[in-house]
Amino acid sequence: AGLEAVQLDGEVFVALLRRAAPGAHRHLRRLRVEPALFLTEWFMCIFARSLPWAGVLRVWDMFFCEGVRTLFRVGVALLRQALGTPEKLRSCPGLYETLERLRSVPPPGCPRTAWSDR
């Protein structure tokens, strides 16, 4: 499993993203942002390094109850939060800015349910 599984999960994630957030999907594809650049940390650590602790506990509860689909659901929600509007996409014109935005989700002051709603 390991990194090979994350790579496969990345392909599934991109397919989900294409349907759930087409603007963000096009942006990532245009910049050639590989899913492994941000999904590895998200999925391998089950968001422990990416979310506030209260959020981590909530995601872990969902993960233990509902399984791996939680990772995809939370990942898509976080990506929509980070890159879901034209303004947010314009503020990330390059690879560096886009990856920095994805590494700092959810943004400070974000309501805790914004990234965990079904």
Image (cartoon, rainbow, N blue to C red):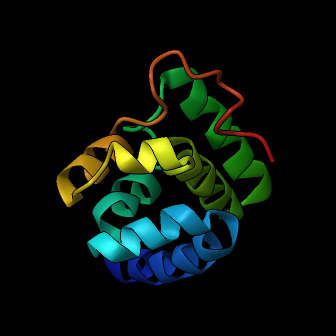
Percent coordinates x, y for residue 84 in the rendering: 56, 49
Percent coordinates x, y for residue 37 in the rendering: 28, 64
Identify which residue is drawn at 56% across, 54% down.
75
Percent coordinates x, y for residue 74 in the rendering: 62, 50
Percent coordinates x, y for residue 53 in the rendering: 50, 23
Up-down: is 95 above or below 2?
above
In the rendered image, which quarter is residue 31 located in?
bottom left
Left or right, 71 with respect to 26, comes to: right
Relative depth, front residue between 3 and 42: 42
Up-down: is 33 above or below 48?
below
Left or right, 117 with respect to 31, comes to: right
Q: Residue furthest left?
A: 96
Up-down: is 110 above or below 49?
above
Left or right, 110 with respect to 98, comes to: right
In the rendered image, which quarter is residue 1 located in?
bottom left
Relative depth, front residue between 26 and 41: 26
The number of numbered discs placed on residues in the rendered structure image is: 0
Identify which residue is drawn at 36% across, 35% down.
104
Q: Residue furthest top?
A: 109
| Whether residue 118 can be seen here | yes
| Whether residue 33 can be seen here | no
Left or right, 59 with respect to 118, comes to: left
In the rendered image, which quarter is residue 60 located in?
top right
Identify which residue is drawn at 41% across, 58% down.
44
Identify which residue is drawn at 49% across, 32% down.
106
